């Protein structure tokens, strides 16, 4: 297969990231891998879609070798209309170039129309790219949540609940601008006004289990990413005095054994994810509640493999191969 991976910047891909691991797994399985930046796509005069990026050498069989090749390799153009698959591994929340990410989704849909398997599906990413996608999910699985761009509405909700609430951007990443507030907190208005300055915001019921951390669980094609009873999942444990479980806020990672809620949530989400073309997804659980879905560059794979000893990366690429065979049959 010929596989292109779209990222924010090819030169910035790190060895510990899922993107490098998937590229290495694909190369080990004999596939051709090209990696392009989100602003380096183009539609030619004949409507063919191309990308300027790095063709990863076949000798780059580890994630570290892939990352090095992307840092130093020459740039080349490829015509994506002749590729078998495109893996969208971008992270819009970590890139100020919203214009590039929005246009890339449009270009991705053009490729879908031309018969290329683009995952995750651009139309699905457009729908699920923000935290508001939770409104499509079963209510019993998620905490009570209000979404608004009206600061006064958010403040009234926090005051009326008479319980601790988490205020955060409806589109965000890495735990930035996430606040835990009490009903009588004198800073609620200031926080709400800051959050809605350029964004919608969410007021989400605080879950006391958050003090013990959350669990990132990977889903593949609407099912748990599970191999021989081992599930691709990791616990993220916040530092003392911190309620955010993001690794970028200093959280530690720990093994996450299979729990019934993981399978229950995956079963409840599966049809919706498959309908929206969301092939590789990370769901974040606090206790028995689903607090977030990560549909772009889902992480957690390195630690899941480290804790279980399972080559989940190869399993993901094998699934992509089956999609390719089924699509051609």
Image (tube, rainbow, N blue to C red):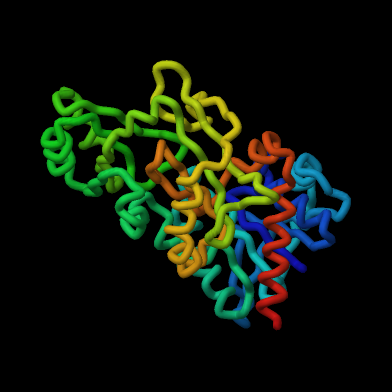
Q: Report the front residue among 310 and 281.
A: 310
Whole-percent x, y for residue 274 in the image: 50, 66
Whole-percent x, y for residue 119 in the image: 58, 64
Q: Residue at x 30, y 46 (%)?
A: 199
Q: In the picture shown, does residue 161 fall above or below 69?
A: above
Q: Is residue 247 left or right of residue 77?
A: left
Q: Report the front residue among 232 and 246.
A: 232
- The quadrant of the rendering that contains the N terminus is bottom right
Q: Is residue 211 left or right of residue 197?
A: right
Whole-percent x, y for residue 183 in the image: 16, 28
Q: In the picture shown, does residue 268 fall above or below 287?
A: below
Whole-percent x, y for residue 205 in the image: 27, 38
Q: Residue at x 68, y 56 (%)?
A: 316
Quick check: can you spot residue 248? Answer: yes
Q: Residue 196: which quarter of the image?
A: top left
Q: Residue at x 28, y 48 (%)?
A: 200
């Amino acid at each position: 297969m010929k596989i292109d991976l779209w990222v924010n910047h090819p030169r910035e891909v790190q060895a510990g990231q899922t993107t490098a691991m998937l590229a290495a797994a694909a190369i080990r399985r004999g596939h051709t891998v090209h990696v392009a930046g989100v602003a380096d796509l183009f539609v030619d005069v004949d409507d063919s879609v191309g990308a300027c990026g790095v063709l990863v050498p076949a000798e780059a069989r580890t994630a570290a070798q892939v990352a090095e090749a992307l840092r130093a390799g020459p740039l080349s153009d490829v015509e994506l209309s002749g590729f078998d698959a495109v893996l969208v591994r971008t992270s819009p929340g970590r890139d100020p170039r919203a214009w590039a990410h929005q246009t890339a989704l449009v270009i991705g849909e053009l490729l879908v129309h031309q018969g290329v398997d683009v995952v995750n599906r651009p139309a699905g990413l457009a729908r699920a790219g923000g935290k508001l996608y939770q409104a499509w999910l079963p209510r019993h699985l998620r905490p009570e949540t209000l979404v608004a761009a009206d600061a006064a509405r958010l403040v009234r909700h926090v005051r009326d609940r008479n319980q601790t609430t988490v205020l955060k951007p409806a589109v965000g990443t890495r735990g930035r601008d996430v606040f835990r507030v009490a009903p009588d907190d004198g800073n609620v208005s200031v926080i709400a006004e800051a959050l809605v300055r350029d964004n919608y915001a969410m007021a989400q019921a605080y879950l006391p289990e958050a003090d013990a951390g959350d669990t990132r669980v990977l889903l593949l094609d609407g099912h748990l990413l599970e191999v021989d009873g081992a599930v691709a999942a990791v616990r993220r444990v916040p530092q003392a005095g911190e309620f955010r479980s993001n690794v970028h806020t200093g959280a530690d990672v720990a093994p996450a054994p299979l729990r019934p809620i993981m399978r229950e949530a995956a079963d409840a989400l599966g049809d919706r994810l498959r309908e929206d073309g969301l092939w590789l997804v990370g769901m974040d659980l606090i206790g028995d509640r689903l607090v977030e879905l990560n549909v772009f560059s889902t992480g957690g794979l390195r630690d899941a493999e480290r804790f279980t000893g399972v080559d989940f990366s190869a399993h993901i690429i094998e699934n992509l191969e089956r999609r390719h065979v089924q699509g051609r049959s």
